[in-house]
């Protein structure tokens, strides 16, 4: 990965409703699964709050959530049951050792460089008639990311933050994902959606990115709280201009890319 950020489940979950909606929209397009009981994997399960939706939709399935963050797995463990468990796995080098009726990944693959190169081995682990479904942010050209990168590349930050942040090529286009997966013998449904999240509270966009995109910076500067706070303050001021508060709240446009690939 570009970076190995330390995750804060509590910060991440502060916007759980907005963050969870794309997963619900993704699952709405997943067809019937071939196995009974089905075997399901959630790659990059985070704190496990949306992994529980898999167990709710397929109540007889055996579901495993995988993540590489000890902090996230500790939080996810509270959701474990006799048919829902959690285990360590890093999506950067994960090779499935069993067959799944559904392999799903929610807002994780953008952290994995060249993740599409793993598609052949992941599709091999999907049962015939099974599905590989994922969604990733498609907003790396949005002000929240562009301003963060520009600030990190400026003096005095560029020496300390060089190579820490992801760039616009962190994900592929919907058409490129479709081409890759159709070439592996899948029937592919790919689309994109821009959500307009209406956020409340002071500096809500900063609060949002503290749970996700800003984590690599916060991790890189964790040993220097004064520098960390200085970066966050400067970045906060830029975000206030880019995302002005209105009488109804602060609007955060957020583009996401969805893919549902069913193995023939």
Image (tube, grey):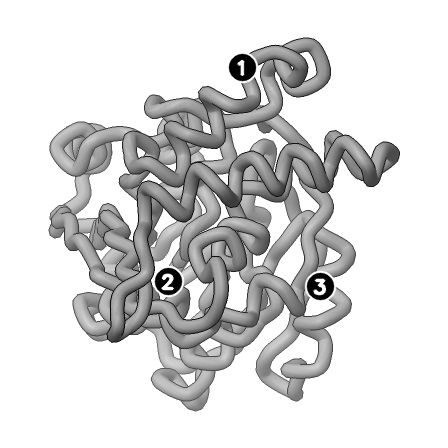
Front: mark 1 or 3: 1
Characterize the local packing of mark 2: few (<14), some (14-19) or many (20 or more) Cα atoms within 10 angstroms: many
User: Which one is nearer the viewer's eye here, 213 or 188?
Assistant: 213
Residue designated by label 1: 153
Residue designated by label 2: 102
Who's the residue at 18% across and 44% down the image?
186
Who's the residue at 85% across and 33% down the image?
224
The vertical placement of 214 against 150, above or below, is below
Instruction: Say whether residue 129 is left or right of residue 204.
Output: left
Characterize the local packing of mark 3: few (<14), some (14-19) or many (20 or more) Cα atoms within 10 angstroms: many
The vertical placement of 263 against 102, above or below, is above
Element on which disc 3 rests: helix
Instruction: Say whether residue 33 is left or right of residue 29.
Output: right
The vertical placement of 58 against 113, above or below, is below
Instruction: Say whether residue 96 is left or right of residue 175.
Output: right
The residues bearing labels 3 and 2 have C-alpha atoms spaced at a distance of 21 Å
User: Which one is nearer the viewer's eye here, 226 or 74?
Assistant: 226
Corner quadrant of residue 144: top left
Locate residue 72, reporting x and y percent. 68, 61
Mark 1 or mark 3: which comes first in sequence? Answer: 3
Asked if labels 1 and 2 touch by Cβ distance under 8 angstroms, the answer is no
Locate residue 182, reporting x and y percent. 15, 36
Element on which disc 1 rests: loop
Mark 3 or mark 2: which comes first in sequence? Answer: 3
Who's the residue at 50% across and 72% down the image?
51
Q: Which label belongs to residue 73? A: 3
Who's the residue at 50% across and 80% down the image?
52
The residues bearing labels 1 and 3 have C-alpha atoms spaced at a distance of 32 Å
Characterize the local packing of mark 1: few (<14), some (14-19) or many (20 or more) Cα atoms within 10 angstroms: some
């Amino acid at each position: 990965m570009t970076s190995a950020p330390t995750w804060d489940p509590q910060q991440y979950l502060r916007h759980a409703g907005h963050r969870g909606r794309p997963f619900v929209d993704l699952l709405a397009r997943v067809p019937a699964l071939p196995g009974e009981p089905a075997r399901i994997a959630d790659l990059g399960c985070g704190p496990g709050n949306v992994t529980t939706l898999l167990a709710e939709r397929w109540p007889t399935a055996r579901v495993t959530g995988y993540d590489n963050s000890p902090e996230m797995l500790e939080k996810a463990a509270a959701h474990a049951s006799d048919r829902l468990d959690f285990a360590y796995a890093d999506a950067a080098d994960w090779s499935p050792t069993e067959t799944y009726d559904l392999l799903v990944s929610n807002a994780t693959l953008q952290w994995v460089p060249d993740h599409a190169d793993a598609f052949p081995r992941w599709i091999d682990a999907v049962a015939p008639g099974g599905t590989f479904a994922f969604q990733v942010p498609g907003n790396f050209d949005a002000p929240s990311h562009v301003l963060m990168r520009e600030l990190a590349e400026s003096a005095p930050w560029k020496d300390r933050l060089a190579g820490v942040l992801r760039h616009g090529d962190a994900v592929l286009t919907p058409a490129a994902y479709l081409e890759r997966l159709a070439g592996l013998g899948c029937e592919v449904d790919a689309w994109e959606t821009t959500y307009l999240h209406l956020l409340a509270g002071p500096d809500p966009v900063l609060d949002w990115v503290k749970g996700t995109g800003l984590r690599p910076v916060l991790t890189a500067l964790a040993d220097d709280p004064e520098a960390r706070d200085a970066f966050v303050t400067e970045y906060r001021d830029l975000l206030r201009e880019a995302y002005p508060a209105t009488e109804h709240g602060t609007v955060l446009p957020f583009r996401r890319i969805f893919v549902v690939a069913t193995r023939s």
